[in-house]
Image: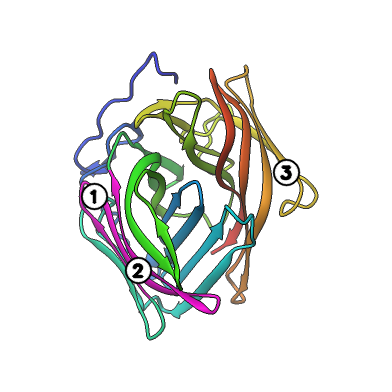
């Protein structure tokens, strides 16, 4: 599970016949079909979360398809001013406003409503075109995320339930957004991505962290860490990974030490075994979401802020990103 054992490329499809290609790979699957019929189609959950990090700004956008409802959220943080985020969120009954791509590397994921528009095209990474209300202003613009090594994983959640996730962090970003009159120049910045398709368990819970930044010497660093959702029999998440200048390395399991007030107090994330990961997260603010549709509900807390500490032999200083606690009954 270390850089001494490079990850293999993924097969072309998630399964051949009844055989699922369970494993962890450095390239994504070309196709990501998970056929579901009748009421079982409501098991299928899909989302694509993207974040863009520069010295001055952090911008996040998420598109979530749950079948019975779809969700768009976005927020922007002015890092230079250390200000609270301006944000937007919308729901679409029966998911009508959201079309989801066939895979993370083919097709288009798009949200279109009277008030907001987001389009993500898979193209040697992703092309992003958006026009979203944030606070009293609008966030408009286009960006490109340049593809590098991925962390692609097919994981069995339980009997007849599988999840496919394609993670990335510390990938180069280019382009330009405009928030009202304020320019957000992405050239020289970095991006992170979480593309997931899951036959999710009825009760799903996780903790997650993602960051992108630069370490001493100028190398780009990206980090994806989780716990509780894709764990092996030892309690180690199978999707933990580090990127250095676009090259991916697997990491072992971590423990999230979540404070009493996760939106304002420091988090600590440490390795379950050894000392690969020892980082501290200081929240600047948080995005909160609580939805309740009777039989289904979601509780979601995503603080954003600064990471410090060490991952392997890399010092982390002032890298920006997010942590998250999530509970869904769906």
Q: Is residue 211 visible?
A: yes
| SS for dot 1 | loop
- Residue at image x 54%, y 64%? 330
Q: Which residues are magenta?
A: 117-146
Vertical side of 83 occupied by 293: above or below? below
Dot label at residue 130: 2
Vertical side of 116 occupied by 65: above or below? above
Position of residue 288 measured from the top left corner of the image (x, y, whole percent)? 64, 64
Position of residue 190 measured from the top left corner of the image (x, y, whole percent)? 40, 44
| SS for dot 2 | strand
- Residue at image x 54%, y 79%? 136
Judging by the rendered image, the residue that carries numbered circle 3 is 258
User: What predominant SS class does the magenta segment belong to?
Assistant: strand
Residue 149 part of the magenta segment = no
Question: Along the polypeptide, which appears first: circle 2 or circle 3?
Answer: 2
Q: Is residue 43 visible?
A: no
User: How much space separates mark 2 and mark 1, taking CA atoms?
Assistant: 19 Å
Residue 141 part of the magenta segment = yes
User: How much space separates mark 2 and mark 3, taking CA atoms?
Assistant: 33 Å
Residue, far bottom: 114
Position of residue 117 measured from the top left corner of the image (x, y, whole percent)? 35, 75
Judging by the rendered image, the residue that carries numbered circle 1 is 105
- Report which quarter residue 254 is drawn in: top right
Please tell me whether mark 2 or mark 3 is closer to you in this view: 2
User: How much space separates mark 3 and mark 1, taking CA atoms?
Assistant: 34 Å
Residue in the foreground of this view, choosing between 223 and 131:
131
Please tell me whether mark 2 or mark 1 is closer to you in this view: 2
Question: Along the polypeptide, which appears first: circle 3 or circle 1?
Answer: 1
């Amino acid at each position: 599970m270390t850089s001494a054992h490079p990850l293999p490329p993924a097969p072309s499809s998630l399964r051949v016949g009844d055989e699922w290609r369970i494993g962890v790979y450095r390239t994504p699957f070309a196709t990501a079909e998970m056929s579901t019929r009748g009421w079982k189609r409501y098991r299928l959950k899909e989302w694509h979360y993207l974040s863009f990090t520069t010295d001055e700004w952090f911008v996040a956008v998420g598109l979530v398809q749950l079948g019975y409802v779809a969700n768009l959220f976005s927020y922007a943080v002015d890092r230079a001013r250390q200000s609270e985020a301006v944000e937007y969120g919308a729901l679409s009954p029966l998911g009508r406003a959201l079309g989801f791509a066939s895979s993370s590397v083919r097709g288009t994921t798009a949200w279109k409503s009277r008030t907001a528009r987001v389009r993500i095209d898979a193209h040697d990474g992703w092309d992003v075109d958006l026009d979203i209300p944030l606070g009293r202003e609008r966030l408009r613009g286009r960006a490109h995320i340049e593809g590098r090594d991925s962390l692609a994983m097919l994981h069995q959640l339980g009997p007849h339930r599988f999840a496919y996730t394609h993670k990335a962090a510390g990938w180069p970003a280019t382009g330009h957004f405009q928030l009202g009159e304020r320019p957000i120049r992405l050239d020289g910045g970095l991006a992170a991505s979480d593309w997931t398709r899951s036959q999710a368990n009825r009760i799903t819970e996780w903790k997650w962290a993602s960051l992108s930044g630069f370490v001493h010497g100028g190398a780009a660093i990206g980090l994806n860490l989780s716990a509780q959702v894709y764990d092996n029999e030892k309690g180690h998440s199978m999707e933990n990974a580090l990127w250095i200048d676009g090259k991916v390395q697997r990491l072992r399991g971590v423990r999230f030490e979540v404070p009493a007030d996760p939106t304002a107090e420091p988090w600590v994330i440490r390795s379950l075994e050894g000392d690969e990961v020892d980082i501290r997260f200081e929240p600047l603010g948080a995005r909160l979401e609580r939805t309740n549709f009777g039989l289904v509900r979601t509780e979601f807390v995503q603080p954003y802020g600064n990471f410090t500490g060490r991952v392997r032999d890399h010092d982390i200083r002032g890298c920006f990103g997010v942590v998250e606690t999530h509970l869904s009954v769906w």
